[in-house]
Every structure is written in structure tokens, then in C-alpha cells.
């Protein structure tokens, strides 16, 4: 195996099967080599300047890592956040991503992304940073996610919002004060009170 091939594999392995054009060029992999690998089906283009090694075994939550690389200012939200925090039985096909109003919205073929526009404190509150395979991924906290689901219930389904609420209330680490605080930020205080009255 040539040195450039070893360098190429090393770059992909260091970045969990993903590599940017700049990373490959730094270790001496030429643009024509990247094109040849694309044609041979050994790598695939994820988005502009981002490639994935086909043979690499994808870890759990790999799509969240890919989206975090594509849109580092976005925050994993709604169904994807519910799934990450194990608050749903649903397995979202798309990665649900919150972006701030008036910012760039990612348009890529893979992984499929469903973008939701948040503004002000509704965007910035309740953000947790998680390390997934040596990559930082920003995800809304469980309580914030439940309130977001109540707010976007008509877009994601009322049944999803109800299930998220039930599952959150069953958790040992539930925090009703935190839930109420996020409900105020998301402007769903009245709705949250109705659900809490019915479920507690």
C-alpha cells in the first residue's frame, strides 16, 4: 500500500470515517486521488468538501456527528434530541436541526436534515454539549426538548409530544421547575400546565 493511501486511511479513521478536502490535502492526498476514489466507490461525497469512507463502520449517532460537522452552529432538536435522550420509541429518518433565524441553512443530500428556525432565547437556552466519538455535538436538554415538542406539536405530531412528556415525567432525574422555565421561554406554559395536570 502506498504512503498516500495509508495517510488517506489515517485521516478518515482519525475523524470517524469522515474527512474534509483540506484534511486530505494536508497529508499529501491529491485532488485527482479524491476524484478517483469517488469514481471507484471507496468514498462518497457527504456535502461540499466533506467525504465519508464507505468501508468505515458507522458508530451509533454517526449522523449527528456528520450534521455537527456540516452545521456547527446548529443544535440537534425535537425528534433527534428525543431519540438521543431515549425519550421516544420513534427512530427519526432525518436529523432534526435547530438553526438561528437569519443564518445559513444546510442543504445536503446525506444525512437528511430537517431544519427548524428558532430565535432568541428559544434557540440559546437548554443547550448541552456531548462528545460522540471525539466530536462535540450540541443537543437540547431533555426538558427543553419536551417544551420544544409541545411548541412544534403540529409539525411533529401531538402523539410524539405526549409520548415525550410521559417519558420525561417517568425519569428519575426529571426536573419540573426546569420544565416550567423552558415552557415559559418556548411560550407553552398554559399547555404544559394542562399536560402536567392530566399526567401527574
Image (tube, rainbow, N blue to C red):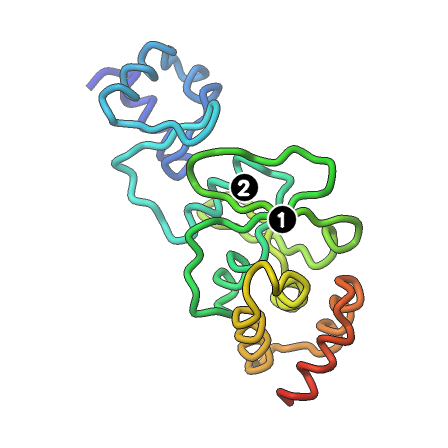
Give the residue displayed 41% in from the left and 31% down from the top.
46
Picture disc at residue 10: none
Q: For this rendering, which residue is in front, 26 or 52? A: 52
Q: Position of residue 122 (x, y in %)?
A: 75, 55
Q: Counting residues from the N terminus, which is met first, the one under dot 2 or under dot 1?
A: 2
Q: For this rendering, which residue is in front, 99 or 20? A: 99
Is 72 placed above or below 163 here?
above
Q: Which residue is mark 1?
A: 116
Q: Position of residue 109 (x, y in %)?
A: 43, 35
Callout in the foreground (2, 1): 1
Q: For this rendering, which residue is in front, 159 or 32? A: 159
**Which element type, helix, strand or loop, lies under badge 1?**
strand
Give the residue displayed 45% in from the left and 43% down from the top.
112
Q: Which residue is mark 2?
A: 68
Is 179 placed above or below 121 here?
below
Snapshot quadrant of residue 27: top left
Give the residue displayed 61% in from the left and 52% down from the top.
129
Amino acid at each position: 500500500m502506498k504512503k498516500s493511501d495509508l495517510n488517506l486511511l489515517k485521516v478518515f479513521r482519525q475523524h470517524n470515517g469522515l474527512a474534509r478536502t483540506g484534511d486530505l490535502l494536508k497529508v499529501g492526498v491529491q485532488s485527482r486521488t479524491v476524484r478517483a476514489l469517488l469514481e471507484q466507490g471507496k468514498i462518497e461525497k457527504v456535502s461540499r468538501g466533506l467525504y465519508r469512507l464507505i468501508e468505515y463502520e458507522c458508530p451509533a449517532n454517526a449522523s449527528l456527528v456528520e450534521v455537527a460537522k456540516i452545521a456547527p452552529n446548529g443544535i440537534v432538536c425535537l425528534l433527534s434530541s428525543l431519540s438521543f435522550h431515549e425519550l421516544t420509541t420513534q427512530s427519526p429518518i432525518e436529523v432534526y436541526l435547530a438553526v438561528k433565524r437569519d443564518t445559513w441553512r444546510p442543504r445536503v443530500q446525506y444525512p437528511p436534515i430537517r431544519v427548524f428556525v428558532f430565535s432568541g432565547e428559544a434557540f440559546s437556552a437548554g443547550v448541552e454539549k456531548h462528545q460522540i466519538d471525539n466530536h462535540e455535538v450540541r443537543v437540547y436538554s431533555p426538558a427543553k426538548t419536551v417544551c420544544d415538542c409541545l411548541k412544534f406539536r403540529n409539525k411533529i405530531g401531538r402523539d410524539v409530544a405526549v409520548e415525550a412528556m410521559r417519558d420525561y415525567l417517568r425519569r428519575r432525574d426529571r426536573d419540573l421547575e426546569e420544565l416550567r422555565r423552558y415552557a415559559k421561554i418556548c411560550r407553552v406554559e398554559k399547555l404544559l400546565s394542562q399536560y402536567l395536570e392530566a399526567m401527574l
